Image (cartoon, grey):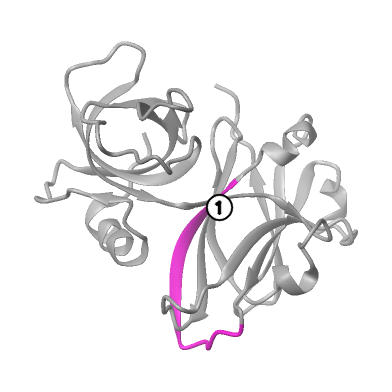
Amino acid sequence: MKKFKFIAFIIAVMTTMPIFQSCLDDDSPSDSLVISTINLISPDSKDFYFTLDDGKTMFPSNGNGWISDKSKDGQRAFVIFKELEEPVKGYDYNIQVREIKEILTKEIVTMGEGENTEEKIGDDKINSTYMWITQDKKYLTIEFQYYGTHSEDKKHFLNLVINNKEAEPAADDANDEYINLEFRHNDEGDTADRLGEGYISFKLDKIQDQMKGKKGLRIRVKTLYNGEKFYEVKFPSSN
């Protein structure tokens, strides 16, 4: 189970992520923080469990009340929890949920398809400080930095883009080993007042049929300080 450093990370999460539901009344050193996927047992049910990025599962012993009618299967989220000793059959961990904070979770888009024009998608500067793919190859998560006012009335738009017009590869000798995508940012004309950071997850189901025989993703980013860069993110090895 990949856990984040609790004290520093929880401060960042509390101050930058929208609250999904909060009942964290007493912080405890035994609490842990992870990124996971919310899985609904059935479309019309509020019963759920979590899948961690390494593929292991967590059963929420106090699951009642955490999921709303608007909750979607496959939603990515930060989960603050306490691990319980009593096992639950069929799950790797039994936990007491302390907090759930949704991470923006989006589909891949194709440039030029529908309303996805160059102007709408944008190509404003942004940094990708860390990227990883879940064990099941269903999600890419990006930790990012960008400049803005960070006010509620100034929304930035982020997308993971298939851009078939971009034919030039980042590395010729590996052109056939990676799927080429672009991490795009539209700042909507916001003022670059201060640096902020955040997390976003993208569903990879749109490129599932392209993954066979590939090593991973090659992602083009127009960075804050170093111009255009290409990052190669390898698919996790099979267990």
Q: Is residue 218 left or right of residue 103?
A: right
Q: Residue at x 46, y 44 (%)?
A: 76
Name the outermost residue toward the top.
89
Magenta region: which residues? 189-202
Is residue 235 visible in this depiction of the protein?
A: yes
Secondary structure mostly seen in magenta is: strand
Q: For the image shown, how many numbered marks are present on the structure? A: 1
Instruction: Tell me what residue is drawn at x 47 percent, y 42 percent.
Output: 75
Q: Image quadrant of residue 19? A: bottom left
Q: Residue at x 35, y 41 (%)?
A: 68
Q: From the viewer's perspective, is residue 193 above or below residue 81?
A: below
Q: Residues within 10 Å of mark 1 (few under 14, many from 20)?
A: some
Rendered location of residue 94, percent (x, y): 25, 24
- Which amino acid lies under the numbered mark 1 shown in the image of this protein? Met
Closest to the observer, 46 or 57: 46
Q: Which residue is pictured at 40% across the width and 46% down the height? A: 77
Locate residue 95 relative to residue 185 in the image: left or right.
left
For label 1, the SS is strand
- Residue sticking out furthest to the left: 26
Query: Where does residue 221 sit, x and y in percent of width and height?
Result: 68, 66
Q: Quadrant of the C terminus?
A: top right
Give percent across and percent down for residue 171: 82, 56
User: Which quarter shows the N terminus?
Assistant: top left
Vertical placement of 90 versus 97: above or below? above
Residue that mark 1 sits on: 131
- Check if residue 196 falls in the magenta segment: yes
Q: Looking at the image, which is closer to me, 146 or 50?
A: 50
